[in-house]
Amino acid sequence: MQTFDLTLIWAVIIGFGVIMYVLMDGFDLGVGILFPFAPNEEARDVMMNSVAPVWDGNETWLVLGGAGLLAAFPLVYSIFLPAMYIGVFLLLAGLIFRGVAFEFRFKARTSRYLWNWAFAGGSMVAAFAQGAVVGAYVQGFETENMRYVGGALDWLTPFTVLTGLGLMAGYALLGSTWLILKTEGYIQEWAYKITRPLLLAVLVVFALVSFWTPFIDELVRDRWFSTIQVIWVFPALALFCAWQILKSVGKRQEGVPFVATMGLFIFSYLGLLASRWPYVVPPNYTLYDAASAYESQLFLLLGLLFVIPIVLAYTAWTYWVFRGKVKAGVGYH
Amino acid sequence: MDLDPVLLSRIQFAFVVSFHAIFPVFTIGLASYIAVLEGLAFRTDNPAWVKLSAFWTKVFAIVFGMGVVSGIVMSFQFGTNWSNFSQASANFLGPMLSYEVVTAFFLEAAFLGVLLFGRDKVPKGVHLMSAIMVATGTFISAFWILSANSWMQTPAGVELREGMFHVTSWSEAIFNPSFPYRFAHMIVASFLTGSFVVAGVSAWYLLLGREVEANRKALSMCLWLILVLAPAQAVIGDFHGLNTLEHQPEKVAAMEANWETQSNVPLLLFAIPDQENQTNHFEIGIPSLASLILTHEWDGVVPGLNEVAPENQPPVWIVFWSFRIMVAMGVLMVLAALTGLFLRKGGRVYQTKWYLQFLRVMSIAPFLAVLTGWFVTETGRAPWLVYGIMNQADAVTPSLSGWMALFTLIGYIIVYALVFTAGVYYLFRVLQVGLEGDDSIDEEHDRPMRPFSAAHVSFEYEPYPGVEKDMNLSPAGVPPTGSSSSSSSKNGGQ
């Protein structure tokens, strides 16, 4: 009966969902992180407007990711969330403040500065928490009998602080290259100016994590330095993307920096997955250990096969409708 | 002091769910009302319908926005605080929650934009369809989430293997024994909530003499609907109660504070349940009535709490009193509807001041009824999480310590208090501006896809032409919003 390796299909779906979320919510979180450093209030208006039509849809991928993870890989869900308990709370609180700020900032006059802080602070906290999750995943979890048994703050180590800050820098880079694409005039000029230092920050973290990880984990060390050398193709491609960002910013190109930044994310992500495969709850459980029942995976997959294409089409259409530059003081028409 | 992670997680979940639930319960009803208004506007061209629909769509947008924001927490709460439960029930609950996201959330998101911002941009028929699709989305959402909840109350279609539930029949699991009753009860409750809020706000506007024609229409529609639904809800509730008696007898015993299995059980109007001594103090009741309601015979035997060990009994005090508040609200709703019918003759219903005031206050009744109803059904299940199979202590996250649960509990309370205050404050600003609000005021800030953009109302107090004189009369319980002097002094700093 089990003709298809459903678990593998689900791993691809969840993996795809995660990178979709990271890329899409990444740039709008990045815009929030850059918010306090914007040249003036008008620039902040434009920045927020550049993401206002799409951020909500972007975040729905996170909810889908949570529910999909529960459905397909309950073990990951029921170990990651308890292990990251405090981090999850910070993430959710950050997203709530951010979401509310989107709604209220344009309604407020005298209290606008409060919503600016809610937006920026919420974005920063959420980005840091997500980066810490990545770090914690590399670090591994203390488990017994398929349950998390570690402490509340085990995830908080120098390494996860580094990955947290690293993802903040990465999202900020996505945000600045997004703004290059979506704005013009002095705001775009400002985005160009901050892109290089942000890229430098990302590369520094990239290097530190790359040197650090093999010392944390034996599996990664073996894989990097003995078994499969092909794995080096991912960091090489990521570095190529970084070089493209640098070059295109110098040439004042508008689209390439954003696309290259997405490439940088995708290849780093693939490199991370390849180093860990097939472990989804390191160091003990593989994706097959973590999978839900075959009939559950099948039941949901049949529905998703119909719905996901529609969702993707709708998402693409939204971006198409709101294409083009965001101008100061002018709304969408 | 020893902090109990199970108790704190229960409080936390109760808090988050209760806070979240008041938004969808309102938007489910309101979405259908807006669809009806849009249908009427489509067919008759009476501008009153468009005016009403445009106004209530603004209110819908704000409440929907708050519901979405508070709802994000829910999908992660299972994993953070109840990881053993998530792990065990994932084979069923995972697909349910995922289907809710993909079938309902994306549908709502897709058509909400058109409903909010498309009135002048898409053909009328498409706008009407968007309203219907948004309403449909709210139903679909309710369907999946109530199926999941009902399954936890009356699990079916699954078998337990190696600590995990495995689905043996999807149809039996989804349409589990209590699902039809719970779904009907909840949908009617949502319609009642929408009706009473619209009726209450319309009554308030009529008291102020604002937009009389449109608000009379709105009030009249709601009162007809309530006249049908309030008694219907009592009947559905009765069926739901009989279903609960069949599947969860100790929940009904707690609702009636009935300690002994016996015949001729009285219907208690007042009592102080004493769980420690397994008895009641100061009982006032109507002899044999509970037996009649539950068994349809005067001397019917009703199971008591003595059927289960004291440690497996739900907290009787909460269940007993929550149930009474819910029923009292239901009785008040029926009275409101009948009084309205009586006053219709000669149009007195639109002019009788005390009745309009009464309706204004009644707009909180359905919220109270829904919350207490949830308390009854959820605490009445204690100590079970999956009824009869998994209790709360086994379901909680093993690594969760009391202080962690307390930290996040306080955190969520602070976050929600801030969000809620801002949201409700803004909602009342929109209600103050009312149907007369000029949509062009904030045109420069019009940005599609953000729900609140549908309302062109400033967060701070700003006088609107023709509305200012009414500012001393604010909706029930809420003081008039900030005087212009305080906001202008803050303006000086900018």
Image (cartoon, rainbow, N blue to C red):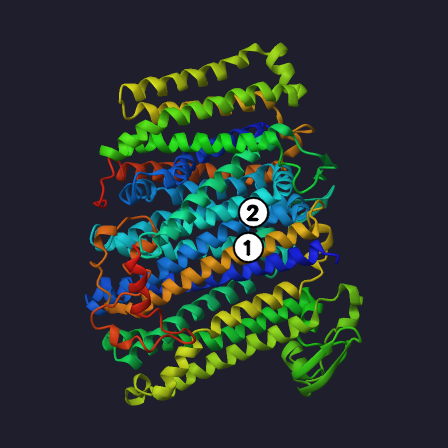
Q: Quadrant of the C terminus of chain B?
A: bottom left
Please state if B13 lies on the left or on the right of A24 as rendered: right
Q: Residue at x 45, y 52 (%)?
A: B69
Amino acid under label 1?
Answer: Tyr
* x, y percent for residue B228: 42, 76
Q: Are marks 1 and 2 on the same chain?
A: no
Residues at badges 1 and 2 in contact (C-beta under 8 Å)? yes
- According to the picture, the residue beneath numbered tag 2 turns out to be A89
Label 2 secondary element: helix
* x, y percent for residue A173: 40, 29
Q: Chain of mark 1?
A: B
- According to the picture, the residue beneath numbered tag 1 turns out to be B412
Q: Residue at x 46, y 61 (%)?
A: B420
Front residue (pair B406, B248): B406
Count of marks, rendered view: 2
Q: Chain of mark 2?
A: A
When the figure is inspected, residue A176 is found, relative to residue B413, above or below; the finding is above
Q: Residue at x 62, y 39 (%)?
A: A74
Q: Quadrant of the N terminus of chain B?
A: bottom right
* x, y percent for residue A244: 36, 18
Amino acid under label 2?
Answer: Phe
* x, y percent for residue A188: 27, 32
